[in-house]
Image (spheres, coloured by chain):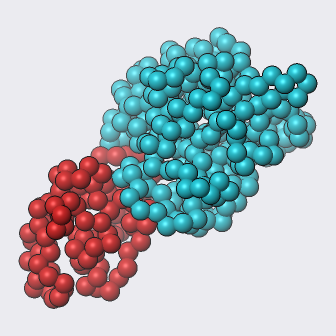
Chain colours: A cyan, B red
Amino acid sequence: MSCGSKCATGCAGGTGRGCAGAGRDRIDEERRSFMRGAAASVMSLGAGVTLYAFDADPAAAREPGEKVTAKNRWGLLIDVSKCADGCSKCVTACQDENGWRDTGHPETDAQWIRTLTVKNPNNGATFSLPMMCQHCANPPCVDVCPTGASFKRADGIVLVDKHTCIGCRYCMMACPYKARSFIHEPLQDQKPYAPRGKGTVESCTLCVHRVDSGRIPACVEACNDTAGGAMLFGDLNDPSSEIAKRVTALRTTRIRADLGTDPGVYYRNI
Amino acid sequence: MIVLMHQRDGTVHDGIRTSRFSLKGCIDCHAVKGADGKPVTIASGDHFCRTCHDYAAVRIDCFECHASRPESAGASAGSASFPGREHDGAALAQYLRSVGR
């Protein structure tokens, strides 16, 4: 198993090569926070009138007709030590769920999730990990989007609104995780709940259609059912949720945390 | 279309997925079966959305991304088939009455 052409530069590979200094990036983060000030005050007004209580069960978190709110912050915790070499169950589950697949053009094929093999050059030790959209709280893809198509939902899921995406691919350049793909060819027979088409950019949606109906993402389900159970999905904002407890209690890593993107995907044992 | 656009923002940005906000919901009911008994895609002139838009000489691009037929073939698909390709106003109105439930 190799990570293919998309991760050839290793920018999200965790080897530490090419990491920018933390001090310089802090300035960028402060600028972003300043620019967001007005929007944030509106959000806090909305949060004040939320009626339902915290609940560990995602299905009970929201009525079907209710808007998503910042009460939730969906995230993943991935224990890399449970990722077997050569396992790609999460990738195939995502392909089956969302209808993307390899068409024999590795340079341009869509990749919502991929497995990376990271190697320590000193001793040759390797391990594998899944890499996908990290659903950042400060997503660079949203910062650069000229049309507002790339956006972060109130509950932390970063999406592309393909109705307004013009296919400029700035977000692909901005993403430090190389999580986004562009669709080059016309498509047929897409999944009804995962619309995707030529001329737009796409990436992992955290299976937003499943999350909205109280289910867990397809990759997490497949990993729990048929692989090592490395992935855990949950609400990082809910202190009683399993993921929040583990993130608080265990030593976790977020990839390129030095960039200040505040990813929603946590890794263990990297 | 104005109504649809408002609802699509409610779905994409606010996560509201009730049937009134769902293009998938429209497609599930308004699917038209072709000669083989399976729902036709937008490639067919019999497709529910295309009948009016062809008549008005408007090409819609919704289905470049969205699925134009229900996922499970035959699931809640209508049994109507389009009477002819002449696309005259009376035939179109009759057809729409037969499939518009």
The part of the image, by quadrant, that contains residue A64 is top left
Q: In this view, does A188 lie above or below A60?
A: below
Task: Name the quadrant of the N terminus of chain A.
Answer: top right
Q: Where is residue B17 in the image (x, y as percent from the top left)?
A: 34, 46
The part of the image, by quadrant, that contains residue B2 is bottom left
Q: Position of residue A181 (x, y in %)?
A: 62, 54
Q: In this view, does A180 lie to the left or right of B18?
A: right
**Total numbered badges shown on the rendered structure:** 0
Q: Which residue is drawn at 60% across and 48% down?
A: A111
- In front here: A2 or B18? A2
Q: Where is residue B82 in the image (x, y as percent from the top left)?
A: 14, 75
Residue A175 appears in view: no
Q: Residue at x 41, y 27 (%)?
A: A58
- In front here: B31 or A120? A120
Q: Where is residue B5 in the image (x, y as percent from the top left)?
A: 39, 64
Q: Is residue A214 above or below residue A194?
A: above
Residue A186 appears in view: yes
Q: In this view, does A5 lie to the left or right of A166?
A: right
Task: Name the quadrant of the C terminus of chain A.
Answer: top right
Q: In this view, does B49 lie above or below B7?
A: below
Q: Which residue is drawn at 80% across and 41% down?
A: A10
The part of the image, by quadrant, that contains residue A171 is bottom right
Q: Residue at x 51, y 23 (%)?
A: A227
